Amino acid sequence: MKRIIYLLIAAVSLLVGCNPAEEAWVQAGFTTDKESYEIGDLITLTNTSTAENAQIAVCKWEFMGKVSYELAAPEPFSVEEGGDYLFRLTVTSDHGSMKSVFEKTIKIIDDGIRPTADFSWLPEQIVAGEEVVFTDQSKAAEGCEIIKREWTFGAILSTEENPTVTFGSHGKINVSLTVTDNKKRKDTKTVTVDVAKSAGSLGVLWAHSYDEQGVVIGTSPATSADGEYVYVSSSNYNLVCFTKLGERVWGFDCGQNNEPNRGSDYQHPTPTVDSDGVVYVAVGDNTSKADAAKSASLYAVKGGADGGTQKWFTSIGAKSSMRPFGAPVVTDRYVMILTNSAPSTDGMHFRIYDKASGVLQYAEKTSSGSYGGCVGLKDGRVLVNTGQSGGRSYGTHIFFPKGNSWSKSTNEQNYAPNDQPNGSQIAVGADGKAYILCLNLGARISTNETKALVYCYDTKKTTEGNVSAPEWYTAVKGENKQTGYGLVVDGNGVVYVATDKYITAISSTGSVLWATEVAGTAYGVPAIDNEGYIYYNDTEKGSLVKLEPATGKAIASLQLGTGLQSSPTISADGIIYVTGMLEGKPTLFAVEGAATGYAANAWSQMGGNPGKSGYMY
């Protein structure tokens, strides 16, 4: 017993005498090269933090609304607005719990001296399709010079001093010039010009709000095969039919079965119009603050002038959620949907229904958080994007027909098995090649090189049980965020892909032809008209933008709503339909241009065609 007591006393003595926490410390600190700065001056920070009997493990810098983690100090930088700015450094030692904070207020002096932005243009009467020369008449302050010019013509960019512009759209368009001097002081001038109509310009035919509540996020217009009717929906679960002349024909309540989260600000799927005029739409978001017992739903509604009546309805199942950016796929026999949250009844995300009766024919699990697109092939196979599961992605599943059922490819046999489709929409060319836009996870190319990849697979070479090799994969600029981006394919196999900041053209062999920077932020999937021109929505600018196919040059920009979080739809008669928000309400815009139809020999838009069936080749 005495021996045990002696050992305990010795152990306590060792602990008391050798406590490293009492001997170690860390002290945060930094200096600046000056005590005050003028706008545009470079600010240099020097880390003077120290530690005793410890190592500095983490340096957290907080300033100008930014956070960075650098042991030395951030690279020198400048500030463009005057004021007193608080800089904070938090230093953590390798002991973890030992921290120290140092703060310093840095003064940026604004002497009020700025360049003055100004410009003129000739001819003063602007006509769409005719060249206009804009002349920079800006002036710099004494002792300074203007070193940078940024023009925006709606959603078209230029950095030339005196750009020559040809407007492709008519109506009122904002022209803006921002000039920056050598001290990084800026000034902006904006003028709204009135562009007269020409034979080939874009212009608004009509615009109508179609719901008093809800939002447009991801849901795009769909039209009948003949272009006579256009259908829209919103997160308020209302399906509305318009004629191509802008007459509202009818509305149908898709929330009559107590679907969850009606009117919320979540993504809502696009309706699909079958060749016989029946409209299919899925509703119900159960991912946030909703009653888990409630179910999402799939409706089949009669279309056309005497439509607006339900053909059938099916409950998807408790806890189910419809948040994909695509539309139901409609084949000759089936309706296919991909849920974001699988119903608790069977846990299956991908679901196939008999389109005549609405009876469930097949269901299969993909991965948690599925919200991307799916495509039906004429031979019965189906391509289905996956979401993330366990911190990774499994690319795109291939479902192979087995009589009245299907078998799913394994994760290793998927298309792009280690990259993330991230809500994007699939496209298929007339030659059977499938194109998939992915968020780059580094499986083939370093994430430092690109944030987005486009994969091309030949579906004709894809066989069950074998690992498919891509025909090619190509890095593109920008990022594939969760906003329903995707791609389209023209009749020559040229792929046009949208990311957040770029529209990129890729040849049939995988080489980048051009990449056009977006003035604001792109949204959704582009569309191709029957003359080969490409259209996309710039949601930040609220504009529909038209690009020249050979060069990617923006030749028209038409301002519409305050946010166009959707994909443009080109109808059989060439009318371009866009959904967005205007004055706080979901709104449908009908736009006229020079085109007389969509690219019928191509996967011309989201879902492949104006009806969004996702079923062509």
Image: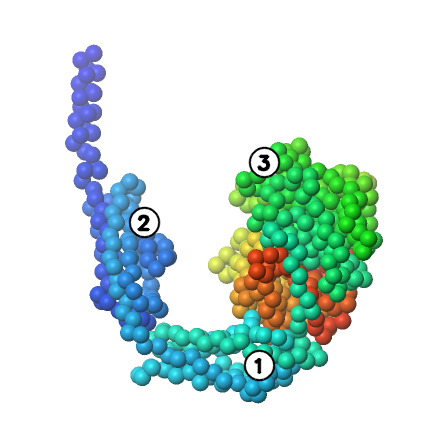
> How would you rate the neighbour count of disc 3 (Cα within 10 Å): few for under 14, some for 14-19, many for 20 or more?
some
Question: Of 561 and 545, which appears nearest the observer?
Answer: 561
Residue farthest top in this picture = 1
* Residue drawn 28% across the image and 57% down it: 87
Q: CA distance from mark 1 to mark 2?
A: 51 Å
Residue that numbered label 2 is attached to: 58
* Residue drawn 77% across the image and 50% down it: 308
Q: Earlier in the sequence, mark 1 or mark 3?
A: 1
* Quarter that holds the N terminus: top left
Q: CA distance from mark 1 to mark 3?
A: 54 Å
Can you give x and y, in whole percent of width and height, for residue 122 in the image? 55, 87
Q: Earlier in the sequence, mark 2 or mark 3?
A: 2
Among the 4 quarters of the image, the one containing residue 78:
bottom left
Are the residues flagged by discs 1 and 2 in contact, CB closer than 8 Å?
Answer: no
**Image vertical order of residue 549 relative to residue 3, above or below:** below
> How would you rate the neighbour count of disc 1 (Cα within 10 Å): few for under 14, some for 14-19, many for 20 or more?
some
* Residue drawn 53% across the image and 85% down it: 121
Residue 291 image label: 3
Can you give x and y, in whole percent of width and height, for residue 188 in the image? 43, 75
**Image vertical order of residue 256 relative to residue 511, above or below:** above
Type of the residue with mark 2: Val
Residue that numbered label 1 is attached to: 165
- Asked if residue 140 shows in the view, the reply is yes
Type of the residue with mark 1: Val
Describe the element under mark 1 as helix, strand or loop.
strand
